[in-house]
Amino acid sequence: MAASITVSENITLVTLHNIPADISFITGVFAQIADMDVDVDMISLSPVQSSKTSLSFTIVDDDLAKILSYTSKLGDSAVKPIVSSGNCKISVNDAGMEHCPGVAAKVFGRVAAAEADIRLITTSEAQISILVAKSDLDKAFALLSEAQL
C-alpha cells in the first residue's frame, strides 16, 4: 500500500448538539449553509438513540463569520452549537486500503503516539481524515509519515 498523507490547516469544527434526529432537519441545515456559499468537508452524525442527536462538520476558518451568523440564530432553540476554529485535518489516502484490514488501527495508533487532541474522525473506503488541534499537527504528521501504511 502506498498511502499519501495530506494536511489542511485553518479548519473550523462546528457541532450542533440536541438537533432533531430527522433527515429533513439535517437537509435544511446543509441547505442553509450552502445558501451562504460555505463548503462543508468532514461530516459526522452521532448515532441516533432518541429524537435528538448531534451533528458535526468542518469548514475553512475563512467561513467562520458566516457560520457564526447562522449558529447565532439557533441560540433561541434547543440546539446547542459549539464552534472550534484553528484546527488541522490530516488525511491518509490510498485506494488500496478498502480491502486491507488494520489500516485504521495503524493510523489511530500513530496519532495516539503523538498524544494528539483528536476532534473528529471521518472515513471512506480510500481515506481516513482526522481533525486535530493545530498544536498537535507537526508531531502527528511526522509519526504518520514515518509509518508504513
Image: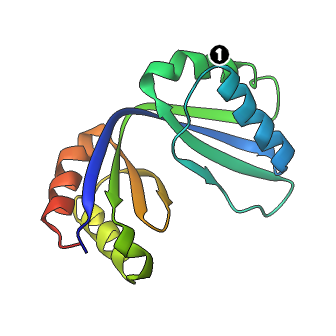
Q: Nearer the viewer, residue 6 or 47?
A: 6
Q: How is the image coloured?
A: rainbow
Residue 126 appears in view: yes
Query: As displayed, is residue 47 above or below residue 12?
Result: below
Q: Is residue 104 visible?
A: no
Mark 1: secondary structure: helix
In screen coordinates, is 135 left or right of 97?
A: left
Local crowd size for mark 1, using a 10 Å CA cut-off: few (<14), some (14–19), many (≥20): few
Give the image location of residue 100, x and y in percent. 37, 82
The residue lying at 54 percent from left, 15 percent from top is 65
Quadrant in the picture for residue 137: top left
Quadrant of the rendering where the N terminus is positioned: bottom left
Q: Is residue 16 left or right of residue 21?
A: left
| Front-most of residues 115 and 12 | 12
Task: Measuring from the top left, give residue 122's x and y in whole percent.
Answer: 50, 57
Q: Is residue 111 left or right of residue 69?
A: left
Q: Specify the quadrant that holds the C terminus.
A: bottom left
> Residue at the location (75% across, 52% down)?
53
Q: Which residue is mark 1?
A: 69
Q: How many marks?
A: 1
In the image, residue 31 above or below residue 65: below
- In the picture, measured across the screen, residue 113 lies left or right of residue 133, that is left
Name the spot of residue 128 as percent of width and height, x first: 41, 61
Position above or below: 99 against 122: below
Q: Is residue 73 above or below residue 126?
A: above
Q: Which residue is drawn at the image coordinates 26% and 55% (left, top)?
A: 5
The part of the image, by quadrant, that contains residue 25 is top right
The three-letter code of the residue at mark 1 reads: Ser
